[in-house]
Image: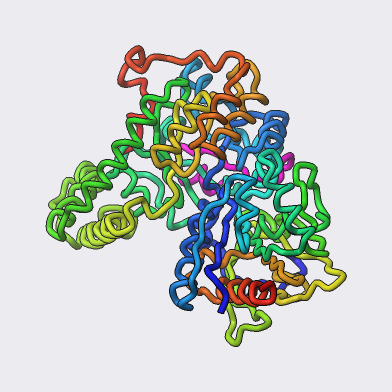
Amino acid sequence: MKELDVSKFKFGTSKLKKGFAKMQKGGVVMDVTNSEQAAIAEDSGAVSVMALERVPADIRAQGGVARMADPRIIQEIMDTVSIPVMAKVRIGHFVEAKALESMGVDMIDESEVLTPADPFYHIDKHKFTIPFVCGCRNLGEAVRRIWEDAAMIRTKGEAGTGNIVEAIRHQRMLTNMIRTLESMDEKPLKDLAEEYSQSYINSIKILTNQEINDNTIIFEEYNYGDVKKEIFEILNEIKKIRRLPVVNFAAGGIATPADAAIMMQLGSDGVFVGSGIFKSKNPEKMARAIVEAIAHYNSAEVIVEVSKNLGDAMIGIEIENIPKEQRLQERGW
Amino acid sequence: MVGKISIGVIGIQGAITEHINSIEKTLEETNTSGKVFVVNKKEEIDNIDALLIPGGESTVISRILFRSGLYSAIFKRLERKNLPIMGTCAGCVLLASKISNDSKDIKLLNAIEMEVTRNAFGRQEESFEKKINIEGLINPYNAIFIRAPVIEKVWGSCKILAKIENKMVMVRQENILALSFHPELTNDLRIHKYFLDMIQIYKSKDL
């Protein structure tokens, strides 16, 4: 924008961050690990691509510490496609996030798919001008991430399994809890806000071993009184509008067009497909089919049509066969 | 007085519900009899008085528009010149007759004699809010630009309604309106009112 006088422009506002997320609605965000895959994803109708070094299924198989991708790979992908590019950082790793922000990545996924960096806190996303998406298993996690200024929430599901069961579990947990808010008056809602603030309290108790009151700073520059109050306000808004106040995507285990469509019918605004595309027999065909299925998610006829002759979806893993400590969804709080 | 107005919003991808909410509020505030609904099937294009193409990713919207047959249904009504349309952001791109940068995936509707550039200001970090002056509105309008396109050139009977320095961000050609920003993300309904006026004037002439 060199030729423009930008002194009257406002950048990085909350409206711009949440607005970006809204433009993703009804779309499929696809995991890609190189520029060839990114080009295939764009041609197939991806709304954005998630630039990674390894897809979740490979991270799961190879083990070890999973970190932010090599910036060179991310840059190559950014140079290849005209659609937005997202990338992942470890939970709490604000330096990885600042690195991605300075590269001009369009959205950051603070993701449990990578190995968490901070045992106490997620990133304070107010301190960034680019939008974040964060995972959740339930309303409490969603509300804390929204309070930290996430512009988009997604289910955690269980990434890299090709098994939809956990994404459905998390979406249902969210929807049903939102429904119960409707019957709550101010007092129970305030109690819930207090309950949802507990994880910050737990962290500060370990770190300082002090008694907590409303004036105690519990996270960055925020005191307990303000956190409680603002979480209460978020809950009140959710109660009023009967949904999260930010865009809500499904992620973690989506492997077929029907998987994508069921998440939309359960109330998701869009989907992330990680290993499901490039671990399938025919990635391009699978990608197109999932895009089509999302655009017509209420049409059984379209689901039938696009599901024909797709070849094998990714193989998939039974959740019970993954030891609890190896489940990615257990990361974050 | 014109009859009940029916407005379709292309329901493929992007800020669909936001536009529906804005139109509903506008109908209510202006006491206009009308309804607004999502349009997903080509048959529905024949029965609407006006169409709104929302923002989202133009590559995605274009692809599904084409594959679902919506594209040719809209095209037919454009040929008969009897469908007022408002396109915002990605919708603005689709209304153009030419794209100056890479556009292999996008099929244009050729509805306005203009050339657009996608993501003209840059990536999300260069998305911005700015008060702009719009012809026909008395006070400045706080416009939200998200990875926005700009209109590089216009010709024929296309009229410029708003610019940021030398970059055009809102134009109108007859009953088609294109803007590169997002009126559905604000509570300011003046743009939706402008569109509604346009539809009503067009509809009353039609009768």
Looking at the picture, how far across and down is residue A106, in whole percent?
59, 49
**Can I make out residue A274 in this image?**
no
Total numbered labels placed on residues in the image: 0
Q: Nearer the viewer, residue B142 or A221?
A: B142
Q: Quadrant of residue B91?
A: bottom right
Q: Which quarter of the picture shows residue A203?
A: top left
- Name which residue lies at 46% across and 44% down: A269
Residue, x 56% and y 79% (percent of image)?
B1
Instruction: Specify the quadrant of the image occupied by residue A53.
Output: top right
Question: Which contiguous range is marked in magenta?
Answer: A78-99
* Residue B84 in view in this figure: yes
Extreme residue in the right direction: B156
The verdict on residue B38 being magenta is: no
Locate the N terminus of chain A by quadrant. Answer: bottom right
* Residue A98 drawn in magenta: yes
Question: At which x and y percent is residue A268?
Answer: 43, 41
Figure check: B205 above or below A193: below
Estimate the x, y position of residue A79 in percent, counting from the top left. 73, 42
Instruction: Give me the residue at 60% from left, 50% from top.
Output: B44
